[in-house]
Image (cartoon, helix red, strand yellow):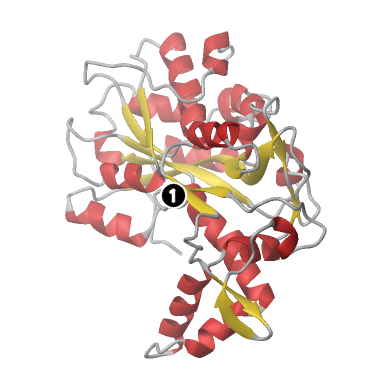
Amino acid sequence: MKFIHITASALAIAAAATAANARDQIQIAGSSTVLPYATIVAEAFGENTDFATPVVEGGGSGAGRKKLCEGVGENTIDIANSSSRIKQSDIDLCAQNGVKEIMEVRIGYDGIVFASDINGPDFALTPVDVYNALAAQVVKDGKLVANPAKQWKDVNDKLAAQDILVFVPGTKHGTREVFDTKLLVKGCEETGAHDLFLAASTGADEEAKKKDAEKACMALRTDGASVDIDGDYTETLSRIDANKNAVGVFGLSFYENNTDKLKVATIDGIVPSVESISKGEYPVSRPLYFYVKKAHIGVIPGLKEYIQFFVSDEMAGPDGPLAQYGLVSDPELKATQAAVEAETPMGPLK
């Protein structure tokens, strides 16, 4: 593949799925974070090959993986996009429904960012700030209490005297899983709340107590300061447009394509960017994946060719259109390409 034609519309997309009627098209669903990358690839694939343009839909990482595991056959999807890694519960559901082999394809990396209205105050956050702003329970005088913070300055006197209102991806989104583990749990541990939750747990053993403590760390306040968003990032953006004091949680690529509307926060003093993520400096980044139903390769026209096209240097490399849109290229892309070529199914989760 020497040359790939990418139209302006393909690069400008981010959310709309391609309409389809016939099942000779590849069917893809899942992550709203991966959606724009997959749509760019799908449109380019349709323009540069003899295959039909794949149908790409959102719905969230968890929902996409669930659809992948509904079974094998033309009435089921071929690929699930995911901004978090597949879970054992997904693999078990797949096996239960006859989906025996799944290919895991890592396409690159993305960051999770906090962003607010471009004309609002600057935010320099830490995991402790995030936890103390949004957690249901926080530590006061060595004890767990219901979160009393009303404004950001109540959390950290260096932050704005602005009411706390954060739009957080709902629990079906892969972004939420990373938000929970890399921000809430980390902040919970650093404030000492995790130890208090651990001590208060009535779990049968240490493992059960740890699970109880982690669950408690991830519990968000329900007084209106934290609002779950079940839609995609465009819904979060529209909420911020309607409430200029709000802060939203986004994927880096979405923010970078809306810098005329949004101002990004630093985390631990690091500005999120492709460069800071690729160097391992920005603390809240994650790999992006898609999962392929191997039984459909050779049955659904163009499926393997699409996968190869997606992870090619021309598309997913550091100089390709996905990097232009905000994807951080995977330094191990060659290994991914080899695994795709060999149709290697994923092994047990580690």
Give the x, y percent position of residue 4.
Answer: 56, 13
Name the residue type under label 1: Gly
Describe residue 125's horizontal placement relative to residue 206 as left or right.
Answer: right
Describe residue 89's horizontal placement relative to residue 124 as left or right.
Answer: left
Give the x, y percent position of residue 165.
Answer: 59, 50
State whether residue 327 appears in this view.
no
- Residue at 70% x, 25% y is 260
- Residue at 37% x, 90% y is 204
State whether residue 204 appears in this view.
yes
- Residue at 38% x, 58% y is 87
Residue 45 against residue 110 in the figure, above or below: above
Instruction: Report the front residue among 103 and 21.
Output: 21
Q: Image quarter for residue 3?
A: top right
Q: Quadrant of the N terminus?
A: top right
Give the x, y percent position of residue 47.
Answer: 45, 9
Residue, disc 1: 170
Residue 314 against residue 222 in the figure, above or below: above
Describe residue 259's horizontal placement relative to residue 270 as left or right.
Answer: left
Instruction: Report the front residue among 92 and 301.
Output: 92
Residue 113 against residue 206 in the figure, above or below: above
Badge 1: how crowded within 10 Å, few (<14), some, or many (20+)?
some
- Residue at 75% x, 33% y is 119
Residue 26 against residue 76 in the figure, above or below: above
